[in-house]
Amino acid sequence: MGRKRLKILVLSFYFRPDLSAGSFRTTALVDALRQKLPADGRVDVLTTLPNRYSSFTVEAPIEEILSGVSIFRIALPRHQSGMLDQTKAFISFARAVLRKTRGKEYDLIFATSSRLMTAVLGAYVAKRNQKPLYLDLRDIFVDTIKDVLPKYLAILTLPFFTLLERWAINSASKVNLVSKGFSGYFATRYPKQKFSFFTNGIDDEFLSLPSTESAPQTDGMVEVLYTGNLGEGQGLHTIIPVLAKRMRGRVRFTIIGDGGRKDALRAALTNAGVDNVELKPPMKREQLIKAYLAADVLFLHLNDYDAFRKVLPSKLFEYGAMGKPIWAGVAGYAAEFVRTELDNAAVFHPCDAAEAERMFSQLRLQSEPRDRFVAKFARTNIANELASDVISTIG
């Protein structure tokens, strides 16, 4: 009797060419799995058509068959960043996944999840198939909702999501945590579970860039760039209007992205009467890299919530690779990471515009390659190590 072909199912709400940390991470992992599996091995990816930002659309095939990989993208109803819209979108995804996996045989289920539910879906598929589950957790959803949801809604939903988290974690053969800041939360609650720590990383597009100086501005203004999500978690609406007003005449902000608090940010900027902030929609990576190269300083911010003291923003890896000064409003593990791993970076307490202004003066306004950081956190290396760990779980 011949050897059975090895087959892995990958569940990810985001995948290439979508714009999100989850997309970049899962794409790199699948590429690494392709290289490590036997020649007759196969990876099935169940994901969605690009949907990260309603203001950014990019074409992608529903079905993509490559050497060793099959990618199936599920169409979702049009949705915004609200919880109800996201719930409807996930239900559509879950129904399609359950339909497509019915009767299929896999040796391992891999699920990567930031908002818990893809992890729960992966646990259900693994139980139904009676196969091992490898979870990759990019956030602590239960810890986050108590901060970002209205208090009455958090009180109502917390017990339910706590049960789901417990079931998903206990269903897994192994769990990877994207931030070592998560270890205290998970280790105390799930002492019998096996955890690994494979972080996000730097994608290849950022590894071969020239270490160029940004062109000096004729008006003497320092160009500060933020790219990414504009949600409650980032809290830009709480810091940028005040900070921009304090630094008028010295700093010009460009903010590229979209999210649930973009309107709140725009309204706060109008109310503050600032004219040194420009909002731009999400853009493709090649355009984004040009924006990085043109900037003098890269800005990062997380809201002042306890849950965000444990996270490690994926954007730090892109920023770090650029060699530009980094101005970061973060606390807890992220602040420790910035101070330990990144040269020419200034950390200030989230939402504190006065401290942000003070720490800005500590930056050297010049590009300085971070060779050690780039070598340590290249996405390809991390994805290869994660892929080996995933495959070893099959036994």
Image (spheres, rainbow, N blue to C red):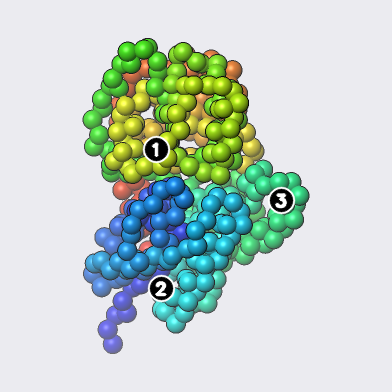
- Residue type at mark 1 is Phe
Q: Helix or strand or loop: what does disc 1 sit on?
A: helix
What residue appears at the point 54 percent right and 33 percent down from the top-left corner?
266
Q: Is residue 15 above or below residue 395?
A: above
Kindly identify which residue carries mark 3: 154
Give the quadrant of residue 311: top right
- At label 3, the amino acid type is Ala
Dot 3 falls on a residue whose secondary structure is helix
* Residue in the picture at 47% in, 50% down: 54
The picture places residue 315, in percent across and down from the top left corner, at 43, 38
Q: Residue at x 53, y 61 (%)?
A: 89
Q: Which residue is nearer to you in this view: 21 or 251?
A: 251
- Distance from disc 3 to disc 1, alpha carbons, whole Å, reads 31 Å
Q: CA–CA distance between discs 3 and 2?
A: 37 Å
Q: Is residue 387 left or right of residue 101?
A: left
Q: For the residue carrying disc 2, how many other residues have a C-alpha within 10 Å: few (<14), some (14-19), or many (20+)?
A: many
